[in-house]
Image (tube, rainbow, N blue to C red):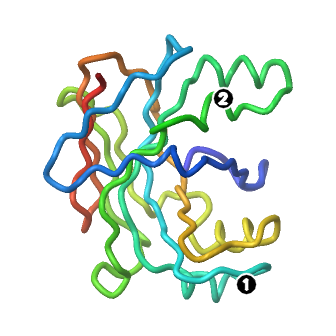
Amino acid sequence: MGSDPTREPPFFFQKPTDAIQFVAANTVGDHPYPTLTKNYHYEVELVAALNKGGRNIPVDKALDHVYGYALGLDMTRRDLQRAMGDQKKPWEIGKSFDKSAPIGPLHPVSQVGHFQQGSIWLKVNGETKQNANLNQMIWSVAEQISKISEAFELMPGDIIYSGTPENVGPVVKGDVIACHIDKLPDLSIKIV
């Protein structure tokens, strides 16, 4: 969502396991504003969790590897990411830090199916900031799994945050972020 595949292939980055912050349904998780940044951004995303791995997975077999889906946030220290990009250095410091990946509960494919379309939105303090449909994804979940598996061996338990709609933006301490994808429980955090 937000790039053109005729100009740019999909790209990926990794987050460590301590980036995960589980947020139970119907709760508002306290999410710490991280160190080293003055420009902290949200990105709402559909998350796919794998139940089997592999290499060079064909697109037409990729969804067979998905256990289920969740709603997630890819939180980003945007100033650090941009500074590293400007210096042509890796930008993990902007993406891969403690609790930078809030996630709601996983829902098995047997209960929710695969997501080809459906509303995805994010609000900050009740004001809509991101609003799109999953059918607008530039690269489908199946295509992403296939492409990632060309570069890395995927493993059961891997999770893939699949990209965000346009209009990412900043939050500050005290802000409440509420996220939604049709058929999944909403995800909410408060920046503390």
Q: Where's residue 142, x and y in %?
A: 60, 75
Q: Where is residue 117, by image quadrant? A: bottom left
Local SS, label 1: loop
Residue at the farthest top position: 38
> 64 above or below 41?
below
Cα separation, mark 2 vs mark 1, equals 32 Å
Relative placement, left or right, of 146 versus 72 is right
> 145 above or below 188?
below
Question: Which residue corresponds to mark 2?
Answer: 93
Going from the N terminus, do you reach mark 2 or mark 1 first?
1
> For the point 32% across and 46% down, which residue is it?
121
Q: What amino acid is found at the position of numbered circle 1 in the picture?
A: Pro
Q: Where is residue 68, by image quadrant? A: bottom left
Which one is in front, 82 or 138? 82
Front disc: 2 or 1: 2
Residue at the farthest right position: 88
Residue at the farthest front position: 18
Local SS, label 2: helix
Q: Quadrant of the C terminus?
A: top left
Q: What amino acid is found at the position of numbered circle 2 in the picture?
A: Ile
Relative placement, left or right, of 29 versus 63 is left
Which one is in front, 53 or 127? 53
Relative placement, left or right, of 50 versus 67 is right
Q: Where's residue 51, x and y in %?
A: 52, 81
Q: Where's residue 49, x and y in %?
A: 49, 70
The crowd level at tag 2 (other Cα within 10 Å; few <14, some 14-19, many 20+) is some
> For the point 53% across and 58% down, which residue is it?
137
Q: Where's residue 54, x and y in %?
A: 72, 81
Relative placement, left or right, of 128 versus 115 is left
Which one is in front, 59 or 50? 50
Question: Which residue corresponds to mark 1?
Answer: 58
The numbered disc on residue 38 is none
